[in-house]
Amino acid sequence: MTSSASSFTTLISWLSLLLCFVEKCPTAASTTRFYDFKVRSLRITKLCNSKDIVTINGMFPGPVVYAQEDDTVIVRVSNLSPYNATIHWHGVRQRLSCWFDGPSYITQCPIQAGDTFTYNFTLVQQKGTLFWHAHISWLRATVHGAIVVHPKSGVPYPFIFPYQEHVIILGEYWLRDIPRLEQAVLASGGPPPPADAFTINGHPGPNYNCSTNDVYDVVAVPGKTYLLRLINAALNMEVFFAIADHKFTIVEADAEYTKPFTTDHVMIGPGQTLGVLVTADQPIGTYSMSMGPYMSARNVLFQNTTAIAYFRYLGALPSSLALPASLPSFNNNLAVKTVMDGLRSLNPAVDVPKQIDADLFVTIGLNVNLCHSRTPQQNCRGPNGGVFAASMNNISFIKPKISLLEAYYRRISGYYTEDFPGLPLEFYDFVNGAPNNSPNDTQSLVGTRTKVVEYGTRVQLIFQDTGTVTTENHPMHLHGYSFYVVGYGIGNYDPKTANFNLVDPPYMNTIGVPVGGWAAIRFVADNPGVWFMHCHLDIHLSWGLGVVFIVKDGKGELESLPHPPADLPRC
Ligand SMILES: *[C@@H]1O[C@H](CO)[C@@H](O)[C@H](O)[C@H]1NC(C)=O
Ligand SMILES: *[C@@H]1O[C@H](CO)[C@@H](O)[C@H](O)[C@H]1NC(C)=O
Ligand SMILES: *[C@@H]1O[C@H](CO)[C@@H](O)[C@H](O)[C@H]1NC(C)=O
Ligand SMILES: *[C@@H]1O[C@H](CO)[C@@H](O)[C@H](O)[C@H]1NC(C)=O
Ligand SMILES: *[C@@H]1O[C@H](CO)[C@@H](O)[C@H](O)[C@H]1NC(C)=O
Ligand SMILES: [Cu+2]
């Protein structure tokens, strides 16, 4: 670009900024962003072991996808690894583009070794921090990266313009090969082992003996404000995050602006993202940014060490000791509630559905099923010689052999049923009791059941945690939509006492349902397709904590699902 052209562009963007304050923001032309993703299995030397991990373009975490609101993103994924792969664009609402959502056996068959598939979707009215990740087996552990969607040119943030932005991806790392680990855990019927390390942007930090000299750091200029785009890409752990002696102001959650809320820690579950502002307003020094466990379930082994990165002021002596951050203790449920209470939509005109067409009540939790293996020593390692399972309304989801979207679209019968119940079979004391008053009744039913809804249905869904095996905070994620979190509480949901916020509820895609409690969400089912809703702890998803919504086409224009792309993988 010539300098006169660029100053002209600058002038235009200043003018539009001005317009933005005066009137409605101008709609800048949207662009198409192209990315090439190569799935590769290779060695990453910055981690202490020397085995191969599955990556995108040899990077861990993977490349950042940058775009602006309303841009189209085209990503060609070539699978050069020996494993089946798919990529999910987590939080992208995929308006009329369900074919490109990515969950394996839900919207597509896997991209098999040697094959290529091109994802093509538009970020319709979306901006903020999202991420992409593999949505097949447990490959997400290493196959993930950020999606950063900026506002349109000339449209300001509704908060102080940060001096710099940093993506901070929180992860869990295993020294063992992930596909083998998955196979072994699922065959055992028992729980997964804790991760060997937590990681911040791929670095475990000084608490792990392999990486003391290799710590991720953010260099901070005294007095400046930074926007940290936090993403929890961990497989199975919800975590706390804090910076020593610094407070955060949360300004965005799941790529939607929130009312500014200041806190000294955050809790973030797998599948969630938070935009937080932090100002370098402390004495010059090096401050730890720490990530530690939040574990709400009983009797679960977990990684009980913190990953550390540095928030290092310009001018701090390299030898200066990093000040430690204090994190809430691993079972501090109140610290979780405090953060949740602070999440409110910034948008003064939220369009929360006030009338409800479909009122669903769905229990979520763990189960132990009977083990029928002839080699119980190897395969019946769950409690009391059973096998672990997990369910929604007592149904453990079994993934089908073909893509459900294809089965639905081409009317291929026999792969799923349409009888997912909108209510539990029995109402009992879900949190403290047992069905039929029989504490040994921990079993679930298995099936590939879906819930079919008409286009435009206004849905309310209450998630109710159960105490079968153990209560636990489950990060529930819905594909294809954001939803308003209109209420939550502890214990069994009771419509007579439940408090709902229909004024400024946060608009999210993943909600951590309080341990031993409930959460209520609302959304309008106006995006046709086959949409997965599941717990974002991969082990729970593998055990069956998921269900599929089928949203039918509407009658109007732009209300039906387009034809599948020509290169859609086959099973
Ligand atoms: C992406 O989708 C749009 C709209 O459906 C289409 O016009 C375009 O050709 C597609 N691009 C690619 C590279 O597939
Ligand atoms: C740290 O070192 C000890 C002893 O050498 C070893 O047993 C352990 O596995 C190491 N931990 C990590 C995370 O590498
Ligand atoms: C986790 O580690 C902390 C600090 O080392 C310790 O106090 C606590 O007992 C540990 N918790 C569990 C559940 O292992
Ligand atoms: C779930 O289904 C199993 C198997 O049919 C049954 O034994 C159990 O009572 C059911 N539990 C609930 C809570 O409905
Ligand atoms: C990869 O996907 C294909 C198609 O679904 C399936 O037949 C094959 O068994 C899968 N391979 C592995 C290793 O899971
Ligand atoms: Cu869960």
Image (cartoon, rainbow, N blue to C red):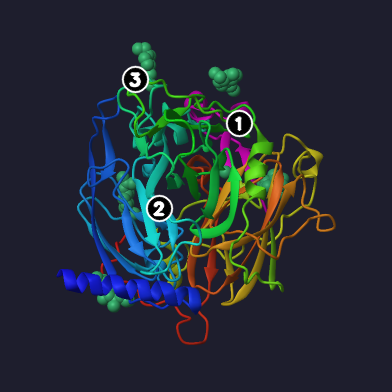
Circle 1: residue type:
Pro
For the view shown, which residue lies furthest in the bottom direction?
556
Q: Position of residue 397 (x, y in %)?
A: 54, 51
Ligand 2: quadrant of the figure: top left
Say which mark, if any, is on residue 474.
none
| Local SS, label 3 | loop
* Marks 1, 3: nearer the viewer: 3
- Which residue is tagged 2? 131
Q: Position of residue 331 (x, y in %)?
A: 64, 31
Tell me the residue that label 3 is attached to: 319
From the viewer's perspective, is residue 7 above or below residue 133? below
Asked if ligand 2 lies within 8 A of label 3, the reply is no
- The residue singled out by tag 1 in the image is 328
Q: Which residue type does callout 2 highlight?
A: Phe
Earlier residue among tags 2 and 1:
2
Kindly identify the residue that appears in the image at 55 percent across and 47 percent down.
249
Image quarter for residue 370? top right
Q: Is residue 15 left or right of residue 83?
A: right
Q: Is residue 476 above or below residue 141?
A: below
Mark 2 vs 3, N-terminal side: 2
- The structure residue drawn at horizontal position 65% and vertical position 60%, both measured from the top left corner, is 505
Residue stretch in magenta:
362-389
Q: Nearer the viewer, residue 367 or 116?
A: 116
Question: Which circle's residue, 1 or 3, is located before the other in the chain?
Answer: 3
**SS under mark 2:** strand
Crowd tier of the residue under label 2, counting other residues whose Cα lies within 10 Å: few below 14, some 14–19, many 20 or above = many
Where is residue 512? Give x, y as percent. Answer: 60, 47
Asked if residue 406 shows in the view, the reply is: no
Residue 564 percent across, percent down from the top left:
34, 72
Q: Residues within 10 Å of mark 1 (few under 14, many from 20)?
A: many
Gap in angstroms between the C-alphas marked 1 and 3: 28 Å
**Are the two marked residues, 2 and 3, in contact with CB atoms closer than 8 angstroms?**
no
